[in-house]
Amino acid sequence: MATRRISSLLSRSLSASSASASASLLLSQGRNHSRGRSIYHFSTAAVLEEPITPPVQIAYTQHLIDGKFVDSASGKKFPTCDPRTGEEIAHVAEGDAEDINRAVSAARKAFDEGPWPKMSAYERSRVLLRFADLVEKHSHDLAALETWDNGKPYEQALKAEVPMLARLFHYYAGWADKIHGLTVPADGNYHVQTLHEPIGVAGQIIPWNFPLLMFAWKVGPALACGNTIVLKSAEQTPLTALYAANLFHEAGLPPGVLNVVSGYGPTAGAALASHMDVDKLAFTGSTDTGKIVLELAAKSNLKPVTLELGGKSPFIVCEDANIDNAVELAHFALFFNQGQCCCAGSRTYVHERVYDEFIQKAKARALKRVVGDPFKSGVEQGPQIDSKQFQKILRYIKSGIESNATLECGGERLGSKGYFIQPTVFSDVKDDMLIAQDEIFGPVQSILKFKNLEDVIKRANATRYGLAAGVFTKSLDTANTLTRALRAGTVWVNCFDVFDAAIPFGGYKMSGIGREKGIYSLNNYLQVKAVITPLKNPAWL
C-alpha cells in the first residue's frame, strides 16, 4: 500500500457535495427498528443477526519479554472478551510486579549492553521501515484482531487505522537519522555543543479505544530516538499489541528493546509507573488514572511523565453555517468510534438562530445511524468496549433525563446481548448538567444553545479539560477569533479528527502534559546534554 496521506481516511471535512455523498453512503444500510413510546428508526439489522466469525486466528497471548513469548511469573491468566456478545475470546497472561521487573530488566540490559542504542540511526530507521511494511502485509489480521477485541467497525480499522499505523512508523523512521544537537556560541574561549541522547528505558501504558494507534504514538518516537521500551497494553484489548510486537521482531528489532506485558492497571500498571529503573513514563487514559500515574512516578524516581488524558471538547456551530454540513460533521465528531474518543466533540454548541433546525436534523441523522456487528459491511457503530463502560453510559443518559434535558432519540441498549447502545441525542442541555461536564465516552450527543461569540467562548472554556475543539463557520474572522480564544491543544476548523503523523496532539489543563506525534513527540524521549571544552588560541569564536 502506498504511504499516502492517511489522515483523510480518519478525518471528516465536508463541502456541500461531500456531505450529501457521505450521508447517502452512510445512511443506505440497515432496516428500521421501533422503540418505546415514539417510533425511533435505528438501522440495527446487524444487531439482530448472529455474530460474524472473525477472519483471524489468535496466535499470541503470552507476554513478550526479551524477545520471547513467556507465561506470567504467577501462571495467572485473564479473559479478553468480544464486546459484540460479552463472550470470552481468549485467556491472556496476567502480568504483575514480577513480570514488570523481568521486562524492565530486559529493557535495561538491551539499553546498557545491547546493539540498539549503539546502532547507527540509519540502521534503526531501516528496522522501523521493515516493520511498517510488515504492518501493510498483515493489515487484514491486525484489523480483524482490533475489531474483535475492541468492537470498532472492521472497515474503520482496515481502511483508516492500520494504514495510519504504518504511516506513523514510516514517519518516525524518517526522523531517526535527523536527531542531532547544536553547536552553541558562548562567551569566552570555549567550544560548546549539545547532544540529544536517548533517555533510556521508557515505560508506556496505552488505552483500549485505539490500541494500534496508541501503540504507534508511543513506540514510534521512543524507538526512533534509540530507547528501549516496556509497554503495558489495556486489559480490555491486549491482542493487537502482542501481534504488532511480534512483527517488530520479524523486522529485526533486537531482543529486549520492545517488551509487552498484559495486565491490569492497579497491578502491572502501578508497578511500571513506580519502577525505580524506568527512566520515562508515557500514559494515555482517563484524567483520574493519570493523576495516580503521575503520583507514582513522582514518589518513585521522579521520572518525567507524558500524559494524554480526557476531554470534553466543544464543537461550535456558528449562525452562518451550512446546517446540513454542520450536522454531519458534528455527528461524526461525537459518534466516531462509538463515542469512545478522548477528543470527541461532546459539547455541541449551536447558535440560537439555527438551533431548532439543527436539532431536528441531528436527530434525523442519529436515527439513521447504522448500528450492528462491526464485521458487517456498512456498519457505522459497533458495541461499547465492555459491561462497565456500557453501564456507565446508560447512567449518564439517565442523569440527562433526570436533569430535564430533552431526549430527542436513543437512550437505551440495542439487542439483548453485547454492549450496543442506541445513538442518543439530547437537546436543551445546560452547562451545569453532568452530561455537559463529564467525559461520557459513548454515543451521547449533548446540544447546547449560545447567543454570541463572547457567550460561547466563556462557556466552552469553562471546563477542567482542554484537549480539542471544533469550529464550524464560513467567516475567517470568526474562525480566527475562536481558534485563538479556545483553551485547547487542537482546534479543527470546518473539519474534525484530522490526525496526521506530523500534527502534534495533546491538551491544556487536565487533559494532559506534553504532546504526541510530530516533531514535538521526540522531545519526550531525549535528554539534552551540554558539553563544554576549552579552546586554546582559537582562530575565531
Image (cartoon, helix red, strand yellow):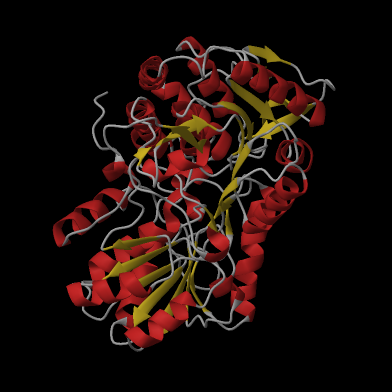
Picture layout, residue 444 above or below residue 300: below
Residue 462 at x, y percent in the picture: 51, 78
Residue 75 placement: quadrant: top right
**Quadrant housing the N terminus:** top left
Residue pictured at 60% horizontal, 20% vertical:
111
Near-viewer residue (198 or 409) = 198
Residue 531 at x, y percent in the picture: 48, 34
Picture layout, residue 260 above or below residue 323: above
Near-viewer residue (52 or 287) = 287
Q: Is residue 52 visible?
A: no
Q: Residue furthest front?
A: 537
Please state the total of marks drawn on the protein image: 0
**Quadrant housing the C terminus:** top left
Q: Residue furthest right?
A: 74
Q: Is residue 315 visible?
A: yes
Report the side of 455 relative to 289 (left or right).
Answer: left
Report the side of 150 relative to 217 (left or right).
Answer: right
Residue 308 at x, y percent in the picture: 54, 51
Residue 181 at x, y percent in the picture: 39, 34
Residue pictured at 49% horizontal, 40% vertical:
373
Picture layout, residue 317 above or below residue 278: below
Residue pictured at 36% horizontal, 21% vertical:
136
